[in-house]
Amino acid sequence: MSDDFHSPSRVNRFEKRRKSTKAITFLLIAGGILILVLIGFFLFGGGDEDNSANNNENQEASPEEENDSTTEADENGNSENENAPEVEEPDSDVTEEEGSDTNGNETEQEAEKETVDSSGDSNVKEAYTADWKPVGTDQQGTHETTFEKGTEDWEEMMEAIELATDLPSSDRIVWWVERGSAQQQVIATVSDSDETETYRTYLTWVDNEGWKPTKVEVLKENDQKYRFEQ
């Protein structure tokens, strides 16, 4: 009688333990899968964020690298590239050289050039001026001359040099740019890319109108090239 009375209890306990074991096993398997999913997410899902962060760092560093090649200005306002004169890149907006029409004929502006005194400089082959106008400017407020390449002031200087010498950016080497003796005046020495002609160009700033060429001297020899010779 005793064995028969206790048999159902033992069966029930066995069934409960078996069910508990199955539940624990299921939970362990589910937990293991969840852990594997989380590990995979951290290993493979975080790569895009890392790459994005690296890309942002590279983009922020670019301007510093570009600044290494910009023009340096000394205490007197003289400007030169550290290792070589500036060779202008072609301007995609320029389709024709200043001073000539599509048939290569002289324009009215070039015909107005007038020979002037070379001020006794033996290196000047000839000097001329013309009725040049300021090139225009978007600068506002008090003007401050800057010799840093890529700035608005520098680019407007280059426009004025092209106006006076008929040398487009694709055929121009800028050797030296310095302050002139007069207020708001600069003197730029440039040549064509073949170095067959060298020009000393005088520019004066006109408030609210931009840089204006005032005189060009054609030099016998490039008197600024020595700065870049070893």
Image (spheres, rainbow, N blue to C red):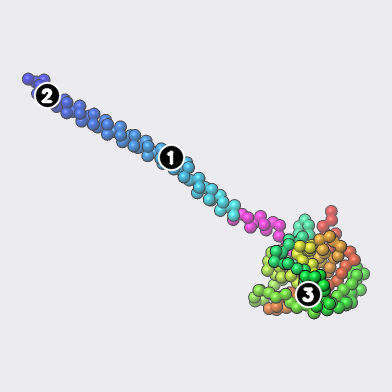
Residue 44's x, y, as percent? 48, 42
Residue 29 versus residue 162 in the image, above or below: above
Residue that mark 3 sits on: 213
Q: Report the disc number at residue 39.
A: 1
Q: Give the alpha-carbon distance from disc 2 to disc 1, as whole Å.
A: 50 Å
| Upstream in sequence: badge 3 or badge 1 | 1
Q: What secondary structure is found at the residue carrying circle 1?
A: helix
Q: Residue at position x 20%, y 27% from top? A: 14
Residue 128's x, y, as percent? 86, 75
Residues tagged 2 and 3 counted as in contact (Cβ below 8 A)? no
Residue that mark 2 sits on: 6
Q: Quadrant of the N terminus?
A: top left
| Upstream in sequence: badge 2 or badge 1 | 2
Highlighted magenta segment, given as a residue range: 60-74
Amino acid type, callout 1? Ile
Other-residue count near label 3 (Cα within 10 Å), few / some / many at <14 / 14–19 / ≥20: many
Q: Residue at position x 76%, y 62% from top? A: 170
Q: What secondary structure is found at the residue carrying circle 3?
A: strand
Q: Residue at position x 63%, y 57% from top? A: 63
Q: Give the alpha-carbon distance from disc 2 to disc 3, as whole Å.
A: 118 Å
Q: Residue at position x 66%, y 55% from top? A: 65
Answer whether residue 62 is magenta in the image. Answer: yes
Out of 120 and 127, give the one closest to the viewer.
127
Is 71 on the left or on the right of 200, as rendered?
A: left
Asked whether residue 175 is in view, the answer is no
